[in-house]
Amino acid sequence: MSELITKYKNQILIFLSLLALISFIDSIKKGIFNSCDFQWQPAKLFWEGTNHYNKFLTNGKYDFLCQGGEYGHLLNIIYYPFTLFEWEVARVLWLIINCFFLILIALLICKKFSITKYKTIILLLIFITCHPTRVTINYGQQSLFVMFFLILPFVFKSNLAILSSGISSVKYSSGYILFLNFLSKKEYKKFFLAIIPYIIGWLIYFSYTKSDPIVNFFEPIIWSLQQEYVRQVVDVYTLGETYLLNNETIYKYLYIILIFIINFIILIKINKIADNFLKFSLILICPLIFFPHSIYDYILLFPLACYSLSNFNILINKFNFYYVIYIFFLHRIIKHTLNIDWLYQPILLFSLITVLFLNIRFNIKEEKK
């Protein structure tokens, strides 16, 4: 079979490229008419001088489509150019930028870690056709935008890359991992560099909306914790919130601190691995385990797919690669077919934890030999 694949690999690649192109065009068509998650309206409110966090917290709901505005202050400032256009135009512009991030993420990772051209094309085809990416494009989500800035310190070794990576902080449930990782490695200079964009965003936001600075600092976090629609995939925080916390706010914050501590310890273990590519891949799995996310956030598994395919001769990497393929293409089908979320979702969470610890254990063990 492997000889047959090798013999006709170019023909297979052309066939897969045609399928990917059809899939990608379909995603773009949906994005043109949907993009409901693109946070255009909260940004527009901000540039009109309205503190949208305060408005939504007071009303207990948001105003437009599924644009809850539960992101960090900086996102609303960055989105200024889009507020100059009507919704129908702005969402198309965002779609184009999302497609740009999609391709750029794949190419940057593959080039940085010297993945062959053939495997790069295969990985790009996987990335643009997988369900998490299709949902991201369809909904106009910010996940690719956040992921691009998350990967910068792993791809480029410069102060500018570290400073820019702080933009990922606009999405709390994913961006936190970058800052926690800097602290776990005692890279305090990088931590303070990366936090500058967040601080600038906050300063501009409360000044422009004439809000109380202290209150406004916490408003995005409070509003984010109140969002229910994002709890589509089970994680450690959601399990605790559902079965242990009973909606007590103080317990929520204590539980979050506990999760950070556990995640911090795991990051210390991950950083004992010598292979920087694998470290990078495992670090990005952590947000999927610990904090609320939806199916589009599973794009964070893409670096693990890249690492595993580039080192496919090792058994555990075969397992890693096929696991990511399952999540990317079969997870949703199996989930809806079984229709037993109360069992399937915890098993999915357990599988992510298993993949993380198997890789930590196997690679640290190998390096000790």
Image (cartoon, rainbow, N blue to C red):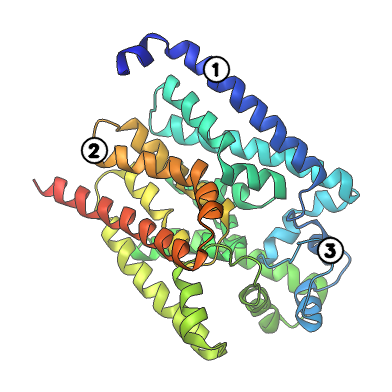
Q: Mark 2 falls on what kind of element?
A: helix
Q: Is residue 43 above or below residue 328?
A: below
- Distance between the Cα atoms at labels 2 and 1? 28 Å
Q: Which mark is residue 15?
A: 1
Three-letter code, disc 2 = Leu
**Between 276 and 224, which is closer to the camera in this rendering?**
224
How packed mark 3 is, by other alpha carbons closer than 10 Å (few <14, some 14-19, many 20 or more), is some
Identify the residue shown where x is 73% and y is 66%: 69
Say which residue appears at 39% left-offset and 22% top-offset: 116
Q: Nearer the viewer, mark 3 or mark 2?
A: 2
User: Circles 3 and 2: CB distance less than 8 Å?
Assistant: no
Viewer-proximal residue among 232 and 249: 232
Q: Is residue 344 left or right of residue 35?
A: left
Bin the neighbour count of mark 1 within 10 Å (Cα to Cα): few under 14, some 14-19, many 20 and up. Answer: few
Separation of residues labelled 1 and 3 (CA atoms): 41 Å
Is residue 321 depicted above or below 297 in this figure?
Answer: above
Image x and y of residue 34, in percent: 79, 48
| Residue to which mark 2 is pinned | 315
- The answer to whether residue 189 of the structure is visible from this angle is no
Q: Residue at x 38, y 65 (%)?
A: 183
**Helix, strand, or loop for circle 1?**
helix
Q: Which residue is mark 3?
A: 64
